[in-house]
Amino acid sequence: MTRVLMATLATVTALALTTGTAHAAPTTTHSSTTTDSFTGPTPPAEPRAGDFGKVFAITDRLAAQIASALADRTVRDRIASATASGAADLLKLERDTSLGPAARAANLSVLAAKGLPANGGSVLQVRLADPGMRAALARGEVPLVAAVPTDDAPTAVTAYDPLGGKVLLDPVKAPQRPVLVVDVDVAKSLTMGLQLMRDTLSARGIVAAKPLAATSAGGYWATKVNAIRLNDDEEPWIKGAAEIYSIVGGFGLDGKPTVNIVQMPYLDYDGTTYYPNQLLVHFSAYKYNLADVVMMEDDGDTNYQQLAQAIAAALLTIVDGGVYTPLVSAILSAIPTSWWTDDPDYVDSWYTLSTSSNGRLNGAAANGWMDVAPYWVSEL
């Protein structure tokens, strides 16, 4: 999904911190004989802290184990059948097989890496990298297996073959040989993760802003998103759909910082315009006629526990001085530094939305835009 460049982020954050107002800114590898191997810079033999992230290290190891098992024709046929129509749950697929223990161990490790409870269920899946590869897989062609890198600009995609070797694939051009992809079911993990964030924030005194059940005016104003689009940055072919959510921040009626976590399940791909008609900000819950939006994504590696704890710690230092203070800079500065290097989960931000916000609003990091309009929510 859309990623922010370091220079752009530095500019946006610097502007927010200095002015406090809204600104719009613009290894040794096994050499395979396949023609899909990619001649280019060789990635490290093993994932290093800060290079790819914990989740990739786990799924990359599992991908190698699955590839080794594909030497057995029975295993190949089982996985080919399971992925013929879409992604397959790895724990269900390998429940009673020799791969079962490795899959269960990897799943527990991924849950821990994402800050999710150990009883969160299965969050690992295997899928074909592209539907166009199904015919080759059905013909019995032996697939490669790869994990989704958390780096959005990898120099190569490392895949594994059943012989135990590594094959470096071009990250831009999809290979002809079928590739099975091991990754996180982000749609499933996001639901758990956002609830964990809400609970963690609430436990630390950052409660969600809730629209008033009744007002003297017979309703309240909200901001409705009519259309939204994130920029097309041509991510690697191995990436699947990302899951987008927004952190909507403002000051509650008690004058304390408050945030709402808003899921945007329709926003799967960049370069596509969506028309959700989604209510993003409910102003009856705020002291001021202003709110900020920080858009984030989970493409598999987000640690929700760390994120919620960091945001809570930052917002609890903000005191209502009688004048609205944008919360975007506090939220951005709370995000762990490593997220801005190889794997930024930040998408974009919008400062000071109000009940009069109308029309196209470009994100501060220039990674997308929203068409918004005021919307009157009437009481029943």
Image: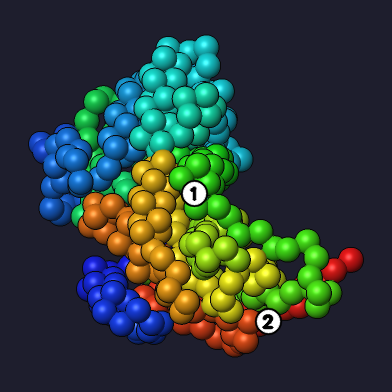
| 42 sits to left or right of 291 | left
Q: CA distance from mark 1 to mark 2?
A: 30 Å
Location of the N terminus (image quadrant): bottom left
Q: What colouring does the structure picture have?
A: rainbow
Query: Callout 2, which amino acid?
Result: Pro
Viewer-nearest residue: 173 or 244: 244
Question: Which of the 4 image quadrants contains residue 11?
Answer: bottom left
Is residue 168 something one can see in this rendering? yes
* Picture coordinates of residue 117, whole percent (x, y): 48, 29
Q: Which mark is residue 374?
A: 2
* Element assignment for label 2: strand
Which numbered disc, 1 or 2, marks the residue closer to the eye?
A: 1
The residue tagged 1 is 205
Residue at image x 55%, y 56%?
261
Is residue 275 something one can see in this rendering? no
Question: Which of the 4 image quadrants contains residue 183?
Answer: top left
